[in-house]
Image: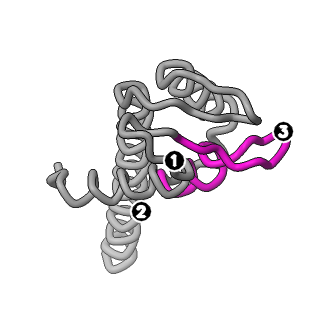
């Protein structure tokens, strides 16, 4: 009976770990999806390898990178650092020209938005 009780406790522990990992994965995907939507709706101009792109084009490009190279983006922070901040071809940082004319790096802009999103989104 002790053996069965120990196995049940181990099984419950494993299930709780799996559930928490799924929750983390879902949360990371929700955050990345939010960032892509944020980009698309921003009306900002994106500079990628010296070329200007609309916010819709930038969102589509980053969504494609996420689909193809999601293994490098286990978290939204990873998504920003590994996929959304620089060209994977040239290594050049992406910059963003905001609607008010301010130019910022994509890394700073997206990190600031992720922080804002995390601070205003209630856990589900």
How far, Cα to Cα, is label 3 from label 2?
A: 40 Å
Q: State which mark lies toward you, 3 or 1.
A: 1
Residue 66 image position (x, y, % from top left): 60, 34
Ranked by sequence position, the earlier of labels 3 and 2 is 2
How far, Cα to Cα, is label 2 from label 1?
A: 47 Å
How far, Cα to Cα, is label 3 from label 1?
A: 22 Å
Residue 3 image position (x, y, % from top left): 39, 76
* Residue situated in front as seen by the camera: 86 or 67: 86
Picture layout, residue 5 above or below residue 21: below
Q: Which residues are magenta?
A: 76-96
Q: Is residue 9 magenta?
A: no
Say how the picture is coloured: one colour
The residue located at (57%, 55%) in the rendering is 78
Q: Which mark is residue 32?
A: none
Q: How many marks?
A: 3
The residue located at (37%, 45%) in the rendering is 31
The residue located at (35%, 48%) in the rendering is 27
Q: State which mark lies toward you, 2 or 1.
A: 1
For numbered disc 2, what is the local secondary structure? helix
Ranked by sequence position, the earlier of labels 3 and 1 is 3
Q: Which residue is mark 3?
A: 89
Q: Which residue is mark 2?
A: 14
């Amino acid at each position: 009976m002790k053996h069965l009780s120990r196995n049940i406790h181990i099984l419950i522990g494993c299930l709780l770990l799996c559930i928490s990992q799924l929750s983390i994965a879902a949360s990371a995907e929700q955050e990345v999806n939010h960032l892509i939507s944020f980009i698309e709706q921003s009306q900002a101009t994106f500079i990628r390898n010296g070329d200007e792109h609309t916010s819709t084009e930038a969102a589509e490009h980053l969504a494609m990178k996420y689909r193809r190279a999601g293994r490098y983006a286990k978290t939204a922070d990873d998504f920003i650092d590994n996929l959304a901040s620089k060209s994977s071809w040239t290594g050049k940082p992406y910059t963003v020209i905001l609607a008010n004319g301010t130019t910022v790096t994509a890394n700073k802009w997206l990190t600031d938005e992720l922080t804002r999103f995390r601070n205003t989104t209630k856990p589900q």
